Amino acid sequence: MTTKLFGARIRRSEDPRLVTGNGRYLDDLGHDAYEVAFVRSPHAHARILDIDVSEGVEVDGLVAIYTYQDLDGRMGEPLPLLIPHPTLTHGRTQHALARDEVNYVGEAVVMVVAVDRYVAEDVVGRVRVDYEPLPAVVGIDAARAAADLVHPDVPGNAAAVMVQESGDAEAAIDAAPHVLELDLSIERSASMPMEGKGVLARWDSDDESLLVHTSTQTSTSVRQAVAAKLGLPVDRVEVVTPDVGGGFGVKIVHPWPEEVLVPWAAVRLGHPVKWTEDRREHFVSSAHERAQQHHVRVGYDDEGRLHGLSVRFWHDNGAYTPYGLIVPIITSTQLLGPYKPGAYRVEFTSLYTNTVIVTPYRGAGRPQGCFVMERTMDAIADALGLDRAEVRLRNFIRPDEMPYDHGLIFQDGRPLVYDSGDFPASLDKLTKLVGWDDFEAYRAQARSEGRRVGIGLACYVEGTGVGPYEGGHVRVETDGTVVVSTGLTTQGQGHQTMLAQIVADELGVPFDRIRVTTGDTRRFKYAVGTFASRTAVMSGSAVALTARKVREKALRIAAQALEASVDDLDIVDGHVEVKGSPGATIDLGAVAVLSNPLRYAFDEAAARATQFATPADPDTPPVAPGEAPGLEGTDFYSPPRSTFANGMHAVVVETDPDTADIKILRYCVVHDCGTIINPMIVEGQVHGGVAQGVGGALYERMEYGPDGQLLNASFMDFLMPYASEVPEIEIDHLETPSPLNPLGVKGAGEAGVIPGSAAIASAIEDAEGIPIRSMPISPSELFDLRSRRSV
Amino acid sequence: MKPSPFSYHRPRTVEEAVELLGALGEEGKVLAGGQSLVPLMSMRLAAPAHLVDVNHIPELDTVAVTAAGVRVGATARHARVEKDAAAYDAAPLLRQGLVNVAHPTIRNRGTTVGSLVHADPSAEMPAVLALLGGSVELRSTAGSREVAAADFFVGPMESALRPGELAVAATFHRPPPRSGSAFVELARRHGDYALCGVAALVTTDHDGAVTTARVALISVGPVPVVVDVGAAVHGTGTAFDTERLAGLLDAAIDPEADIHATAEYRRHLAHVLAARALTEAHEHAGPTRDERAS
């Protein structure tokens, strides 16, 4: 085999194109298309009385105006509830265009198609919608109080109540030497990709086929959804993802109203139609996440060991539940982190509010769970006067207890069983990296300079590589190029590089001869999508298995050509060689030629595979039974259950004694995602995650007024951290291979974001000596906490 | 986020510009750096029927330093004023304020006079003008008028500029000898509008004792709030009494709560940041160049 690429810091092959501005995003396509803008509800909750488009139709350049009344067939039905669950007794989804009621500010009511977006917005400004405002339910408190209802047929605003239990938690807590209760909360934030959503659809009326480009995390599933909604045979619909400028979860939701409306209009108008979401639309009509309130009851002993843990929490799911209960299910299970809780009981209520829907955003319910568990650990340490790291260590699941079964059901419907991990080793690395044991000396020194500093830490476990499956296709072209395709999509993570590294090693071809395509249903029809940190695990394993298959086939064909035994062959640098016989070699391109018996020689290379080129056995068919022409293969990987990555973060903060300004001085990460394919890409993923974790801890929140207006729907007031707010990130790795997949890998995409709020809260609490019970926290809020303490 | 239809005008002289603005009245809006106006138009929060682009009038693109102070033309970019060495020598507070204005890319395009006319109560440059003193020169078909700094800022996002007028330049006065200045602010993120910001100007006698001390505060009132804090100077003239300072400030400011900070916190920041700005300004106040030479 040539130099091993698996595990090497290979530079991302995507970057030269992307960083020089040559990416091809949705809005770069379809300049001939009509463009769409929407009339969106200005009310959080209202009945639609009348829609008057008469002023709008006067505008030059208008093509069409559609309301709910125009939606025919299945277009008029509510959008699908993607992930049903038996406890989701009151699931609700919206219509593509609001029918008679709106349930959040931003819900699409009227679709305008015009020659360009300028004209479309002019028309939007002239459409008059009469509403009868209804009381808005905003925030978890109002939803729980249920004085008003979001959906009149959903009592208590409760979409679902779900309980999971392992042992008798309440009894264990009652019997424990010590009991603590905590109320904790996390505010709303959102994925906020740099590129919003966008859809372009082209209907070919002669071919009766539809080509949809969409900025999605799942092209195969959008394809199914569009075909179903439009009543088209699936094979007449293809969905392609161009470059996607970030997803972070929001683009796994599908079909968005626009994702079916735009193709529907393109068919109806017989003309390409495009919609590019703007930032304001993204704020008020794409998904948010995070908002939860938790009540914790924990029983523990003098050593700080947990005997029982009971968590009751309330999850704000927004106005509808298209993505089911995935976020609170993840919170309720991943809350446990690397710890043995003793007996555990968790109960959550998923609540409707008149706000934007809540669906997974990077971390997907884990940051909340981690915050709750880690705050509990700190509270126990504080109550017992023990070191915070020591309390964690005492509660860890030990390596010899792996695989560890929590006795719960995870988000994939499978048992919550940790496959591997060495938590004590990770903690040891982290405390050394950050200098945990030397911090008191640093604190004393800082204090003598009039500075106030604190240190915090947080640990998490992340179920990654969720099934059901992904597949890969690998083909060696006759020029030796290797084309690889997988059905899931990419949003800038470096998948092309990572997958090419795997194929290069498995097949024995140079990295730069490999071209990877993702998210194009014309190339690969069966896939699930990109979410749950699953691409390396799922598609990585699938393309590895596929490449092995293609390698076997190449060796079979080459063995015949070289008149050698398969066992004596190896593939090096794109050539099949007979081991120990220099010169006895055939390049993979030539093998590809031979794999496809030809009648016609369209070029010199092809001549080698034509019928008179070489003598052949007159009694065997040119394509042997069980074989197929072409040096290619397809295979799939389907794991029994998720593989569990883990990590631990430590943060040093400084808080200004006068202004209450909060500054991160150091941010240390120990990360274990199993065997690493490309450390540079993993570190990049961790960096991005940490940046979002810092955002969630110190800056980002969706500021809804009591009337359901989003008050900070712009980048001026919704504060995402700039590079200037993100600290230098120090990373150390541990590699505990997963036994579940052929590569030993675990997911890394979401990791960095998960413990941000927990670790930063821990550090601020340490600096200030004030309990931090809700995040994010701003200087103004810290000032407020200080003022209340001093009263 | 696409603007409503508008007509675009590109005058080549100030005369041409004021003729246009006079004819357009309320319908016309001046485009200089566009850093506030263009986003407002894209969000359709502003929908002027006519834009008068003054970026192609050479005489407006000036920064001139005189004995009296620094005269900044209507299209001089923040970045140019910030980096102008003579302007810095004459009034260091210009640069001290400008480095807090958004980010370098925005300062490359945004104009100082545009920021004054926009009159955002959270913006730095109105406070700099209010504290240094000076004036804004407004031109219309009726002629020219100079509005003193103290009269220019009328309310939030409202200046003394009338429809039909073009702000052609602003003059920032040169502080007296042995003065020092500083600009201290706290923003949620680097480059954001400040939760509270304080410009300070301190003048000392030959012994370094403070003779006058004034501050201008942003984000704690409808316009930049200028406060004479001379009464908070300790008898020795070398330090400030923080309690007296707080009292003087509280009498002048009127902070409001928003999604980023409570009014109480802003009030607290005003006290803390004013003390810091005054101390820093006092450190900067030294003998004049001539005095040093002698």
Image (cartoon, rainbow, N blue to C red):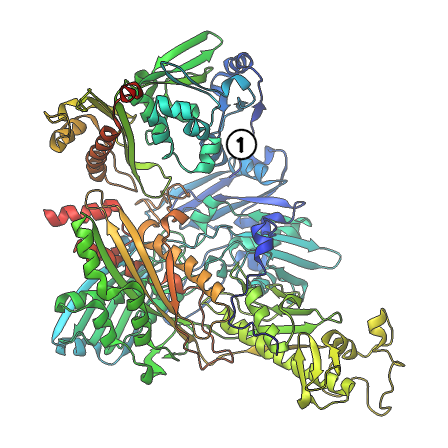
Chain label for disc 1: B
Q: Return the x and y of residue B198 as percentages of the image width and height.
A: 27, 31
Q: Residue at x 30, y 53 (%)?
A: A665
Q: Is residue A359 visible?
A: no
Split into 4 quadrants, where in the image is the N terminus of chain A?
bottom right
Q: Report the number of discs.
A: 1
Q: Amino acid at mark 1?
A: Ser
The local secondary structure at tag 1 comes to loop
- Which residue matches tag 1? B4
Q: Position of residue A402 (x, y in %)?
A: 35, 83
Residue A208 lies, in percent from the top left, at 71, 59
Position above or below: B80 against A725: above
Pick the residue in front: A194 or A53.
A194
* In front of the other: A266 or A315: A315
Foreground: A92 or A592?
A: A592
In the current view of this chain or complex, which residue is farthest to the bottom? A619
Please state if B32 lies on the left or on the right of A460 as rendered: right
> Which residue is at a point 30% across and 76% down the rendered structure image?
A424
* Left/right of residue B165 with respect to residue A593 in the rendered view: left
Q: Is residue A110 visible?
A: yes
Residue A297: percent from left, percent from top? 19, 69
